Image: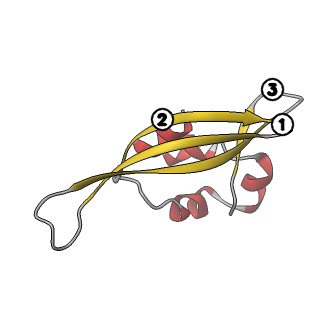
Amino acid sequence: ERWQALIEGRMEDAYEYESPEYRKIFTLEQFRRSMRGTGLWKKAEVKSVACTETCVVTMQIYVTMKLARLDGPMDMDSMLKEQWMQDKDSGSWFHLSSK
């Protein structure tokens, strides 16, 4: 859901997945400025999840980029790892940003 919000440019929705601690430090506008890729991201797939105290989620992100010297757009993909934690009180899951 977080990645779908990012792909669709719904930064307010994606911001809500950030941890409460992150949101105390960084405003929505700062979060919005830090997200580079909106409009380029096309699809995101979860490849694996490994949990101990937090969960590490391996994602495959698909992008379409327009590069100088190429006639048309180029499709690419990249793997990334995200950390997530569950709030014990609410049961909600939060993305742990590295920023």
User: Against 53, is 38 above or below?
Assistant: below
Residue 78 percent location from the top left of the image = 45, 52
Residue 52 circle label: 1
Q: Which of pointers 3 and 2 indicates the residue nearer the eye? A: 2
**Secondary structure type for disc 1:** loop
**Circles 2 and 1: CB atoms closer than 8 Å:** no
Q: Which quadrant of the rendered structure holds the C terminus?
A: bottom right
In the displayed orientation, state which residue is furthest to the right: 89
What amino acid is labelled 2 in the image?
A: Glu
Q: Residues within 10 Å of mark 2 (few under 14, many from 20)?
A: few
* Of pointers 3 and 2, the one earlier in the residue sequence: 2
What amino acid is labelled 3 in the image?
A: Gly
* Residue nearest the observer in this picture, 10 or 55: 55
Check disc 3 and report the residue beneath it.
91
Q: CA distance from mark 2 to mark 1?
A: 21 Å
Q: CA distance from mark 3 to mark 1?
A: 16 Å
Colour pattern of the rendering: secondary structure
